[in-house]
Amino acid sequence: MSDRAPPAALEIDGAGHSFGRRRALDGLTCSIAPGSFTVLLGPNGAGKTTLFSLVSGLLPLREGRIAVSGFDIRRQRSQVLRRLGLVFQARSIEPDLTVAQVLRYGAALQGIGRRTAGERIATWLDRGGLADRAGDKVRTLSGGQQRRVEILRALLHDPALLLLDEASTGLDIDSRAALLAEVRGLCSAQGTAVPTAVLWATHLIDEIDPVTDHLLVLAEGRLRAAGTVAEVLAAAGTDDVATAYRRLTAPTAKAA
Ligand SMILES: Nc1ncnc2c1ncn2[C@@H]1O[C@H](COP(=O)(O)OP(=O)(O)OP(=O)(O)O)[C@@H](O)[C@H]1O
């Protein structure tokens, strides 16, 4: 039994969702390995946020199956939530709290005891380069630093899967690159039994690391390609990421 492969961090089988007559996600099947960094790439309206809302339970899953670390999101909701870290597009931290307060409340909501929380917060603040800002109010931080606080909060309970929806929105080009490098580094530095897999939703192709990342290319609610960057380029018949993105996300006749 012990040599059995660990379950996927995220397993999606035929997931779909409609808002009234609008089909937002259609027959999505894919899987994300533990500890991997996967870029969910797709233009506006592709269905990225809808997918995150289904995985996190903000929208009810009525079509298909989704499992996080082997736990079914419909039947094993609490096990799933314990293994999920979430950072949504809109800022979600109270500007008048201090960084330490934000993290302490986050830990409490995850049911982490005070002592363990204190240790983890100190470790993560250090890793996130924010140890000297612990006592500062969130409103005094830059946009990029506020985003890092949200990400650290989402990592406090060592989730198996961290979902980040357009986390770099509003950041300048250098801050975006720094944030991405940090998220990649923070997760690989964990040393936990189950390494955190990251699903990073974006419409920006320059956020892809062509060597290490996996890609899910989504358009009009459908998965258009999946795999390593090399595999996706091969599927698109080009060696240029921008060309591949344009080809793979081109509107179908129906939508054009
Ligand atoms: N609450 C809603 N009610 C109706 N339609 C919705 C709702 N939320 C999303 N949609 C539609 O579902 C489709 C997918 O939207 P979604 O927000 O998932 O895309 P996205 O890839 O996250 O886009 P963006 O990059 O612009 O955030 C779009 O056509 C959108 O208009």
Image (cartoon, rainbow, N blue to C red):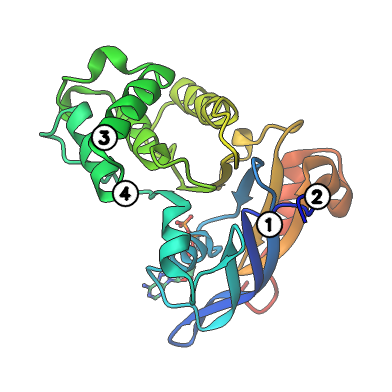
Residue 3 marker: 2
- Secondary element at tag 2: loop
Along the line of sight, which residue is nearer the eye, 40 or 107?
107
State which tag comes first along the sequence, 2 or 3. 2
State left or right for residue 174 relative to residue 218. left
What residue is rendered at 27% in x and 43% in y?
Answer: 106
State left or right for residue 14 relative to residue 239. left
What kind of residue is marked 2? Asp
Mark 3 to mark 1: distance in Å?
Answer: 29 Å
State left or right for residue 186 relative to residue 152. right
Judged from this view, the residue extending furthest toward the bottom is 21
CB of mark 3 within 8 Å of CB of mark 4? no
Q: How many marks?
A: 4
Q: Which residue is mark 3?
A: 103
What kind of residue is marked 3? Leu
Above or below, 186 relative to 41: above
Residue 86 shows in this picture: yes
Mark 1 to mark 2: distance in Å?
Answer: 12 Å
User: Within the image, what quadrant is residue 189 found in?
Assistant: top right
State which tag comes first along the sequence, 2 or 4. 2
Mark 2 to mark 3: distance in Å?
Answer: 37 Å
Residue 170 marker: none
